[in-house]
Image (tube, rainbow, N blue to C red):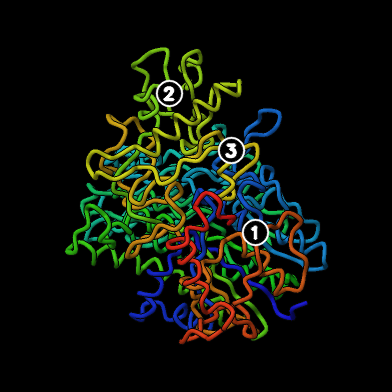
Amino acid sequence: MRKGKLYVIGVDQMILSLTRRLADEGAIPTIAGLLKRSYVTQALSSYPCYTPNNWPVIATGANTGTHGNLAWFVQMPDGGKVPAFSSIGINAEFIWEAAERQGLRSAVVQYPGSAPSRLKNGYIINGTANPIFGGCPYELAAAEVYATVRNVDISGFKQITLSPADGWQGLPAGGPPPLAAPLRVTAKQERDARVWQVVVLGNGEGYDRAVVCRDNDLATALCVVPLRQWSEWARVVFGDRQGTVRFKLIDLSPDGKRFKLYRSQIMPTTGFSEPDEIGTELIDRFGPYQEHVSQVFDTHGVIDYETCLEEADCQSQWLAKAALYLTREKACDIFFSHWHFLDDVNHYHLGYLDPFWFKYDAAKAPEHWDKVRDAYQVLDRMMATLLKEIGEDDTVVMVADHGCSSINRMVYLERFLCDRGFLVFKDPTTPKTALTRDWYNKIDWQYSKVWLHEGVFLDAFNIFINEKHADGYQKIQRDLIRELRTWVDDKTHQTVVAMALGKRDAELLGLWGDQLGDVLVVLEAGYQLGKSEGRTPVEDNQTELTAGHARMLPTEESAYGTQKAIFTIAGPGIKQGYLRQTDQIGHMKLVDVTPTLCHLLGIEPPAQSQGSIIYDVLECHDTVRARPASTPFYQPTEQFKAMLETFFQERDVLSEEVVPC
């Protein structure tokens, strides 16, 4: 077995073209140095190019059809629906489980679908890693913002009114009259909701700080928050659990009329790891663990980007320190993690960088490059913390689950199916979106030829046929595939659908099994499935998301947008500064990651592993082979082409109908 440790740093939506540009300009020196001593390539994601299915692909070596985690939920045999960010629905063995069988110990931090743990002697910390705001099952309360002015209507943004702090105890003398307001905390469990109090204090020049208290008494203070700074972490109790919280006073005018306070996500100090004590041990060593970076507030203009970056920095440094501690102090041979922050950044900013985007404006690109650069620099600092402590026998992998591409047009597939007579509702005014409440009861099952799962259960790219008889089933399938393949966008005069495949043919994309529908839809570059109700089946993208992934061709690529993931690996026996020659040997696939890592570790791959070993990562192996510059002479075949032409054109000995090949 390999002597050193294996570190797999999963970076959601990390893109090679962006990474190389930033490395070349000197913005990310640590990653630039790592690339120079790494094998580097792009990897094809498993379709759909999603977060929930591709992290299991990476860690099991199994195709999506085999591990069965096709989209956001997995339907179990008894009809139950299991979230995709749970190991319960992932029907394949993970690399850390295979390694444990062969005597190696693993630690897995913030990796989607790794909990509940199936290890006996390893560590799983926050094994759900759900990227949705408020989606963490462990959190005691999602982050919230409190402000005197509310300019957008989003969850977690609360308007407050500051008024004279009457009835307060322990207030200091001097300065402007203290102002106060209640802070209502929305907890994960309704029974744990509570109201804290904030009092705003100042000096001779005006208000300059806030104090968050449990009650109207300064003696019950949780923390003091200076203007434009973070408070210290405070410990709070929710029911029978203890959690950690901190605040940042983003804005406070000297006269107290303008006020904005950000409260972090409140994560517990126990109950988020397996075994439970390892989470507490890491918190005691490195401080509170934050599962979610709340960029949702930045993208809606509620908080500033700097605050978001500071949260990302805090989280990523914790991950790097935990990686070193778990491998060095807890004797783990393998470390896997996942960091989601770049995914959020790319969705909102990548379009502005890419001339392929229909709203691209070169004058606006620099400010968005700045934001992307800042995000990658957070990652660079994380890698610096990790790399300065690892040894020469260690192997370091950076891998993404998918890329991100500009969205020009939104596709409303439910509207398309209705307009073409495949999907019928009892009430014609029913909104044409699977997010409609009571969706199944609104479908007219007598006349509908097809149906879609409600919400984001299996997504609209996965269509089911409402017909059991073989003849009727096949006719509906053929008719729908024809309509999809010949669907032309009236504006662009291009086809909307790149591939429409029947269930049997979806095997071409690594899809099969009980989660797959009867017709699978893959969109052309620049198109994305919409969730709302479109007025027409395809319209310009008017959403805040400039770029997306999942439903486009896995090979899609433009100047900076792509659906392809990044894969880099550095370590003993690995080629240094080598870029895979994809034009000669093709792309590796994410399903190849685990088989390759197992080969390097000297262990057997997981039981359901189906990928290949990428031998060209090895120093001693050269996959690329050049053809001879001049055609070699070989007498037996020298006249073969001329002979065939004579048969076909002059002697008419062979006809097209009887050529055996």
Residue, disc 3? 516
Helix, strand, or loop for circle 2?
loop
> Is tag 3's residue or tag 1's residue first in the polypeptide sequence?
1
The residue carrying mark 2 is 422
Secondary structure, mark 1, is helix
Residue drawn at point x = 64 percent, y = 45 percent:
86
| Residue 371 visible in the shown view | yes
**Which of disc 2 and disc 1 is earlier in sequence?**
1
Residue 165, quarter of the rendered image:
top left
- Amino acid bearing label 3: Leu
Q: Is residue 360 left or right of residue 507?
A: left
Q: Please tell me how crowded label 1 is: few (under 14), some (14-19), or many (20+) other residues with Cα within 10 Å.
A: many
Q: Which residue is mark 1?
A: 59
User: Looking at the image, which is closer to me, 333 or 623?
Assistant: 623
Local crowd at mark 2 within 10 Å, few (<14), some, or many (≥20)? some
Contact, mark 1 vs mark 2 (Cβ under 8 Å) = no
